[in-house]
């Protein structure tokens, strides 16, 4: 049976830290579905969602084990649709763990077959967050080295 993992997030934007988690995750899973969700707690996206899908698809155009999808439903339901029994998540720090742990427990409650696998962010990417990238970009700062594509 194929080991399929969802890598869910708003990815606004998708960073080198996210990319690192996917590349490392490919050593554990047969397929990774990067799942770009409509996060109800984040009212307005900074980067257009369709633009982000295109950018991420291009990054993985030669890696057929990676797929990109948009979704607007519970992550646990999306996992069932794709035959995924794992969620892949990256952790930069203990604050990320506290947040992700709660979500992981709810996803497991909603879908008993769903296990969350946490990968600790590689040190060189630990300070990168989508929030910081958006702020730097908004005010004209250079962000290219933090993204696996050009904006």
Image (cartoon, rainbow, N blue to C red):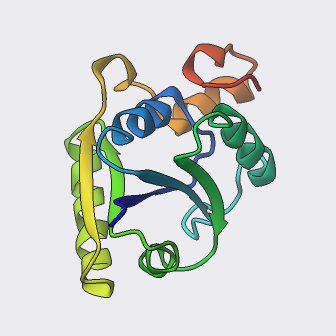
Residue shown at the point (54%, 66%) measured from the top left: 41
Residue shown at the point (70%, 25%) measured from the top left: 137
Which x, y percent locates residue 62?
64, 33
Q: Could you tell me how many numbered marks the image carries?
A: 0
Residue shown at the point (52%, 47%) measured from the top left: 65
Which x, y percent locates residue 98?
22, 55
Q: Nearer the viewer, residue 17 or 111?
A: 111
Please identify the quadrant where the C terminus is shown.
top right
Vertical relation: 57 (above or below) 147: below
Vertical relation: 78 (above or below) 49: below
Q: Quadrant of residue 109?
A: bottom left
Q: Quadrant of residue 94?
A: top left
Q: Nearer the viewer, residue 57 or 107?
A: 57
Q: Nearer the viewer, residue 114 or 47?
A: 114
Horizontal relation, residue 139 to residue 82: left or right: right
Which x, y percent locates residue 23?
42, 33
Vertical relation: 101 (above or below) 22: below
Vertical relation: 91 (above or below) 125: below
Q: Is residue 33 visible?
A: yes
Please identify the quadrant where the N terminus is shown.
bottom left
Horizontal relation, residue 21 to residue 51: left or right: left
Which x, y percent locates residue 118?
25, 49
Horizontal relation, residue 88 to residue 134: left or right: left
Q: Is residue 46 visible?
A: no
Q: Nearer the viewer, residue 27 or 57?
A: 27
Instruction: Report the residue that reaches farthest toward the front.
Output: 1
Q: Quadrant of residue 136?
A: top right
Residue shown at the point (58%, 70%) measured from the top left: 40
């Amino acid at each position: 049976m194929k080991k399929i993992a969802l890598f869910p997030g708003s990815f606004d934007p998708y960073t080198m830290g996210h990319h690192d988690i996917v590349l490392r995750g490919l050593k554990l899973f047969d397929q990774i579905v990067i799942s770009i969700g409509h996060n109800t707690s984040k009212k307005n996206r900074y980067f257009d969602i369709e633009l982000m899908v295109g950018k991420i698809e291009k990054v993985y155009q030669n890696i057929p084990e990676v797929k990109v999808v948009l979704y607007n439903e519970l992550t646990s339901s999306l996992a069932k649709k794709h035959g995924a029994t794992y969620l892949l998540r990256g952790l930069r720090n203990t604050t990320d763990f506290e947040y992700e742990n709660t979500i992981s427990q709810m996803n497991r409650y909603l879908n008993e077959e769903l296990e969350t696998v946490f990968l600790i962010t590689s040190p060189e990417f630990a300070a990168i967050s989508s929030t910081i990238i958006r702020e730097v970009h908004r005010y004209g700062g250079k962000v290219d080295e933090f993204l696996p594509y050009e904006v």
